[in-house]
Image (cartoon, rainbow, N blue to C red):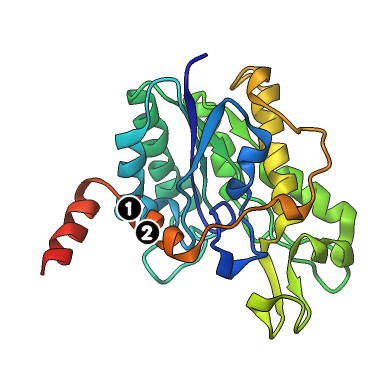
Amino acid sequence: MRHVRVFVAGDSSVTSRPRSMAPMTGWGQVLQIFIQNAEVVNAARAGASSRSFVERGRLDWILENIAPGDLLLVSFGLIDMKPGDGRFTEPFGDYQWYLRKYVLGARARGAHPVLVTSQASRSFDDHGNLRRPLGLYPMAVRELAVRLAVPVVDLNEWTVNWWRQAGPAATKALFLHLEPGEEGNFLDGMADNTHMRGRGALECARFVAGEMCAQGLLTPDFFRNLDANIPESAVEYLDDHFFDQMMKSRTGGRAASTQMSEALL
């Protein structure tokens, strides 16, 4: 059996978290629990948009390391929608233009791109109706996937349906909603409606893996635990120092050269 790697490019909803951020968890952090005989390389970065991930050399690093037969999962949108700091993209404009770079870059190296729509945020109005702050970004992903004949995993639509069924109260257990003193890393408590804790991340990763299996992106022998009950205690967090070093090392091309030059000054 050939050695396969599953590279993941994305934002804070996808990225792995260090021990100091537990129990905050990205779905890319736990994807390996549902995949076997293949290595998950989670290169997602907190605060990244489809634009900034490219501009800071992180896509370059992936393309320098990806090989024929590997997969590249691409999931952006939560940061692309925020104007004002140079990371914003228009859904049917430069957002799609940047996503094309991931798709075409992977294909040029014999790898297989997969577009993943962003998870929905926990955003309910006063009447318990779920808002959809991502707006047109998931639609832009679906349109581009059709145009480029790229597989798409519609995590956004799946989570929208899940959040709606669960409702405002039950969804708190999926996101980083913590009482003061509940967790050592967040002693003052937390009410975060964007970032998930282990339970939410595990179910999102299960869905992504299940869709990869159902769509034949990898053969069934690459998957495991799709129907297993996985506790939050199964989530692993990296040592902070190792995590920081790993994140800093995952830039390539011009960005890596710039970092090297600055380090020598």
Residue 245: mark in rendering = 2
Q: Is residue 144 above or below residue 180?
A: above
The residue sitting at the left extreme is 265
Q: Is residue 75 visible?
A: yes
Q: Which residue shows up at 38% across the image and 52% down it?
A: 53
Q: Residues within 10 Å of mark 2 (few under 14, many from 20)?
A: few
Measured from the top left, where is residue 64 in percent x and y? 29, 36
Query: Mark 1: which amino acid?
Result: Ser
Q: CA distance from mark 1 to mark 2?
A: 6 Å
Apparent side of residue 228 relative to residue 56 in the rendered image (left or right): right
Could you tell me residue 201's position as x and y percent? 69, 52
The quadrant in which residue 171 appears is: bottom right
Q: Quadrant of the C terminus?
A: bottom left
254, 117: nearer the viewer:
254
Say what secondary structure mark 1 lies in: helix
Give the numbered dot on residue 216: none
Residue at horizontal 76%, vertical 32%? 226
Q: Are marks 1 and 2 in contact (CB under 8 Å)?
A: yes
Of residue 119 and residue 57, the one placed in the foreground of this image is 57
In the displayed structure, would residue 188 be above or below residue 108?
Answer: below
Percent position (x, y) of residue 33?
67, 39
Q: Nearer the viewer, residue 253 or 264?
A: 264
Give the x, y percent position of residue 233.
74, 55
Three-letter code for the amino acid on which mark 2 is drawn: Gln
Q: Which mark is residue 249?
A: 1
Would residue 88 be visible to someone looking at this image?
no
Q: Is 201 drawn above or below residue 61 in the view shown? A: below
